[in-house]
Amino acid sequence: MEERLYREPTNYTPKIDFNPKKQKFEMAGISRPEDAYDFYDPVLLWMERYTERVLKDYEENKLLNETFIMVFDFIYMNSSSSKYIFQIISHLKKLYEKRLNLTIFWYYDDLDDQILEDGEDFSEIIKIPFNFMTREQQN
């Protein structure tokens, strides 16, 4: 099993908390890293290994009604971050295509149409339903 991937948020990078034991994955905060590749490449590699393991377990009938939860709660993300977020969602799509229980929450500020539109675009392009919720609905 993959180890938990946790990164504290900074003024430029989001909190990342990918917890395979709870099967809950969260990205929250601001995403405008100076070097998007340097920040996101290890995250993508982690997600790729994790989804491969889950799919292997699925093929070997080792999964028992697991539920996978992905939470996106961005205050801001730049265009280079969007490309990496899209790739992370693409890995999750592999679970969705196997009809595994995957729930994606996309939080946004009531007044921030851009973050909402970004999530709607991702959902539409990748063909996975998202649960769109304002931050007020989060609690």
Image (cartoon, rainbow, N blue to C red):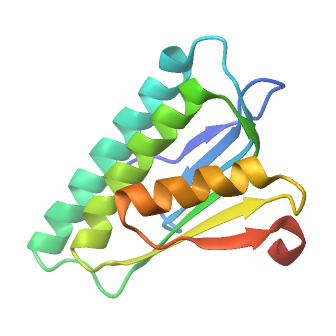
- Relative to residue 6, is residue 73 drawn left or right? right
Q: Quadrant of the C terminus?
A: bottom right
Give the residue furthest to the left: 60
Q: Compared to 31, does 39 lie above or below?
A: above
The image shows residue 58 at horizontal and vertical percentages of: 18, 73
Q: Residue at x 57, y 60 (%)?
A: 120
Q: Quadrant of the N terminus?
A: bottom left
For the question of whether residue 1 can be seen, the reply is no
Numbered label tally: 0
Give the residue furthest to the top: 34
Q: Compared to 129, does 116 lie above or below?
A: above
Q: Residue at x 73, y 62 (%)?
A: 107
Which residue is at the front of the view, 25 or 121? Answer: 121
- Relative to residue 69, is residue 12 drawn left or right? right
Q: Compared to 119, does 57 lie above or below?
A: below
The image shows residue 135 at horizontal and vertical percentages of: 85, 66
For the question of whether residue 137 can be seen, the reply is yes
- Relative to residue 33, is residue 65 drawn left or right? left
Q: Compared to 33, does 58 lie above or below?
A: below
